[in-house]
Amino acid sequence: MSIKVMITDDHKMLREGIKQLIEFDPEITVVDQAACGTECIEKFPEVKPDIVLLDINLPDMTGIRVLKELKKKSRRSKILMLTVHNETEYLMESLDNNADGYILKEADSTELIKAIKAVYRGERYIQSDLIPSLNARLIQKDTEYDMVRELTKREKQILISIAEGKSNADIGADLDISERTVKNHITNLFKKIGVKDRTQAAVFAIRNNLVNV
């Protein structure tokens, strides 16, 4: 039985090129294509693909949003992210949202076919040259998790306020403490999380889901 694949990418020539490449393998059949996230989500229940090759950059919504919607509709179908982005943050966000694989568009057809077959078997596939940066990011994530746990309730309140763009005066008024006390808390807070300024502190808060963006 063929592995049924649906390709979602806004570039028609790229879709056709991928189709030709992966269908060289007799075990793979491209059953449908979509040019945007909306089209993919609409076609998905009818097509019932084994695997969706999903671009992260789509014209109407992000591939991550499409990934979330497809996972709501079916846990059986596998989602393999196909992207130009080798940044670890995109990879982490995809994995956090239950993507079954992540491969770059620059990969050759042999690796793409290997990835398709791996996720079809129920394995999680990540392109090999992305593994070192992923491991480093996971170590950082564990370290930052420990940092967050070490913060006091007041320090978390102040960190969230910084991420929301509030001044020391605003924070003091909200928490009914003096600006000097706010400054002291911020000094201690910055040391604990290893940042040097308010922008880095805000990024830390966002990355560790203390605030929504």
Image (tube, rainbow, N blue to C red):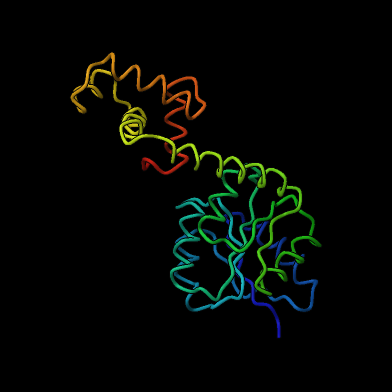
Q: Residue furthest bottom?
A: 1
The image quadrant of residue 179 is top left
Answer above or below: position of 139 versus 177.
Answer: below
Total marks placed: 0
Residue 71, position as x, y percentages in the image: 48, 67
Residue at 75 percent across and 68 percent down: it is 22
The image quadrant of residue 53 is bottom right
Q: Nearer the viewer, residue 208 or 12?
A: 208
Residue 168, position as x, y percentages in the image: 29, 19
Residue at 72 percent across and 64 percent down: it is 115
Residue 159, position as x, y percentages in the image: 36, 31
Quadrant, the N terminus: bottom right
Left or right of 185 in this view: 147: right
Q: Nearer the viewer, residue 47 or 177?
A: 177
The image quadrant of residue 212 is top left
Residue at 44 percent across and 37 percent down: it is 150
Q: Residue furthest top?
A: 180
Residue 36, position as x, y percentages in the image: 50, 58
Q: Nearer the viewer, residue 79 or 168?
A: 168
Quadrant, the C terminus: top left
Residue at 74 percent across and 49 percent down: it is 106
Q: Nearer the viewer, residue 13 or 68?
A: 68
